[in-house]
Amino acid sequence: MSDDGQIPLFEEGVAAGFPSPAQDAIDRTLDLNELCVRHPAATYFVRARGDSMLGAGIHDGDVLVVDRALDARDGDVVIAAFEGEFTVKRLDKSGGGVRLVPENPAYPAIEVRPGVECSLFGVVTSVVHFFRCPA
């Protein structure tokens, strides 16, 4: 990090397979809010708990970026309150009904039936996944 708090962004990228020669030039700086937040007044962060969304790349302790300004579409990962309990699941509107589907076969899908209390609290747009939490 530079003295002005800016964090460098190397646009070249880094190979996840065969290594490539390192680039010496910093292309620009990156603000994670600029990258992850489209609607600041309607965005919040929440920490994931549990392992029901491992298949979507969401692990216990990850930070989710949630945008309330987006209309949830079929297939989106959403934050929902189902019968008073908050959960993160994939929204499934296929087949004429609505389900909240986990991304781990160890958990059942939640069928949202008429008359059951269920509200959506936003669409998950990004996940901050830590390999080693900063101290």
Image: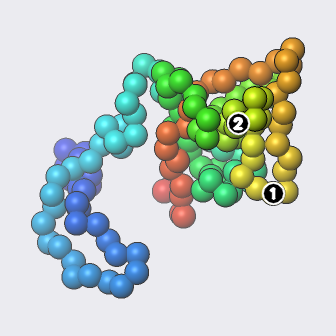
- The colour style of the image is rainbow
Name the residue nearer the viewer: 102 or 133.
102
Query: Residue 80 appears in which quarter of the rendering?
Result: top right
User: Residue 113: in sight, yes or no?
Assistant: yes
Most extreme residue toward the bottom, as rendered? 18
Q: Where is residue 30 in the image (x, y as percent from the top left)?
A: 27, 48
Q: Earlier in the sequence, mark 2 or mark 1?
A: 2
Report the residue at 59% width, 38% height from top.
76
Q: Position of residue 45 (x, y in %)?
A: 54, 34
Q: In which quarter of the image is the N terminus?
A: bottom left
Q: Which amino acid does label 1 sit on?
A: Pro
Is the C-beta separation of discs 2 and 1 under 8 Å?
Answer: no
Task: Tell me if residue 26 comes above or below residue 103 in the rendering.
Answer: below
Report the residue at 21% width, 50% height from top.
29
Residue 73, disc: none
- Please name the residue that numbered disc 2 is placed on: 94
Query: Residue 8 appears in which quarter of the rendering?
Result: bottom left
Q: What element carries label 1?
A: loop
Q: Is mark 2 on a helix, strand or loop?
A: helix
Q: In the visual, does 59 lie left or right of 82?
A: left
- Please name the residue that numbered disc 1 is placed on: 105
Query: Residue 98 appears in which quarter of the rendering?
Result: top right
Name the residue nearer the viewer: 83 or 48.
83
Most extreme residue toward the top, as rendered? 115
Q: In the visual, does 102 lie left or right of 26?
A: right
